[in-house]
Image: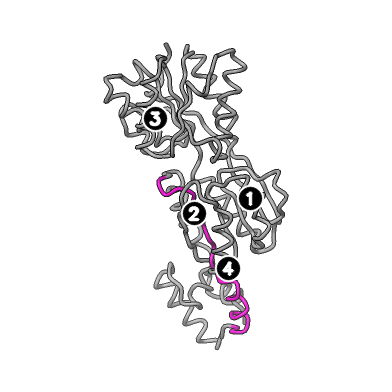
Amino acid sequence: MTIKDLSAQTGYSVGTVSRVLNNQPNVSEKARRTIQEAAAACGFQLNTNAQQLKQQRSNNILVIVKGSSNQLFGALVEAIQSRVAATPYHLVVDYMDEYYNEVLRAVQLCREKKPLGLLFLGGNRKHFLADFERIDVPCVLVTSDATDFPFRNLSSVCCDEDLAVKQTIEHLIDLGHRDIAIIGGYLERSDTSGRRFEGCLAAFQENDIPFVPERDYVSARFSYAEGYRAAKELLTRQRKYTAIFCMADVMAMGAIRALTDSGLRVPDDVSVVGFDGLPIGEFIVPRLATVSQSVETLAQRSVELLRDNIEGKNVCVHEIIPAQIQWKESARAI
């Protein structure tokens, strides 16, 4: 008798049966009792040789998260955890600074933890091209596109960031804004910021809107405090902005606080738009206009692709999911 036979006999999934037989958590007491009784009745025993071979790799899926203050990634980790709990695998989460080398960190953790596969939440192109060939397990890059990377064990799931940003800036222009500032990441260190910056530039150029990065762009980390600092810096510059686009919702919310503390009203004096679609944006005053990425879709597809790759169903898949621009109270026409 096999685990599949026990699954058919008890009516529980193969993953649930496997977790019970390996004495793992996330199983109801009813399921655990039913499966244990069925296994005892038929004299079922685990193949310990197969287990030992499998343990050379472990039963873990590793998630490497760039940036401990990135709330989008925090929400993604929660959504990924709930989906991995329904599989035979364990989830191990590793947080790192947003500007550290995630690929070298993955190489180290692969040696230590021997995961079956990895999910990268955020990634830098230079790091992947330089070192990813040292990783031989299936991987999925989440929120960044790996379509043109030369690795057959690397899939990706993301939205079309530069297009979404371009459309957002174009809509601000349609609303009458010409003096638009950008708060974003450090372009030389953040691929995400680079892609979103390209979308901004394309919108400005196609609409003949002057944009001088040294004057109209402020670099910041992806956090509330840094958004606050960056907005304060913009207010010291010799230009009156009617709109600020922030490359993350946390930056946008920090910027709104800074503008309010400086005696300005959002959106009456300055419109503010973010990126990510964090739920908290619906509950601040004013409600945050933003580019929304579907956390549920990103989590579901990344786990599905990784599991398919681990189980040999796919080699390499790249998916673009749609982003939705949500115009709410923090932006207005002038």
Residue 58: say if magenta.
Answer: yes
- The residue singled out by tag 1 in the image is 128
Instruction: Tell me how far mark 3 sits from mark 2, CA to CA.
Output: 32 Å
Tell me the crowding category of disc 2: few under 14, some 14 to 19, or many 20 or more residues within 10 angstroms, Cα based. many
Disc nearer the start of the sequence (1/4): 4
Q: Is residue 293 left or right of residue 265?
A: right
The percent position of residue 186, horizontal first and vertical second, equals: 50, 36
Instruction: Tell me how far mark 1 sits from mark 3, CA to CA.
Output: 30 Å
The percent position of residue 225, horizontal first and vertical second, equals: 35, 37
Q: Quadrant of the N terminus?
A: bottom right
- The residue singled out by tag 4 in the image is 111
Residue pictured at 58% horizontal, 36% vertical:
322
Identify the secondary structure beneath mark 1: helix
- The residue singled out by tag 3 in the image is 230
Q: Tell which of 309 and 223 is nearer to you.
A: 223
Disc nearer the start of the sequence (1/3): 1
Disc nearer the start of the sequence (3/2): 2
Instruction: Tell me how far mark 1 sits from mark 4, CA to CA.
Output: 18 Å
Give the residue type that dot 2 points to: Ile
Work out whether 63 lies above or below 210.
below
Disc nearer the start of the sequence (1/2): 2
The percent position of residue 119, horizontal first and vertical second, equals: 56, 55
- The residue singled out by tag 2 in the image is 80
Instruction: Tell me how far mark 3 sits from mark 4, CA to CA.
Output: 40 Å
Do the CB atoms of the residues marked 3 and 2 lie less than 8 Å apart?
no
Q: Which residues are magenta?
A: 47-69
- Depth check, mark 3 against mark 2: the one in front is 3
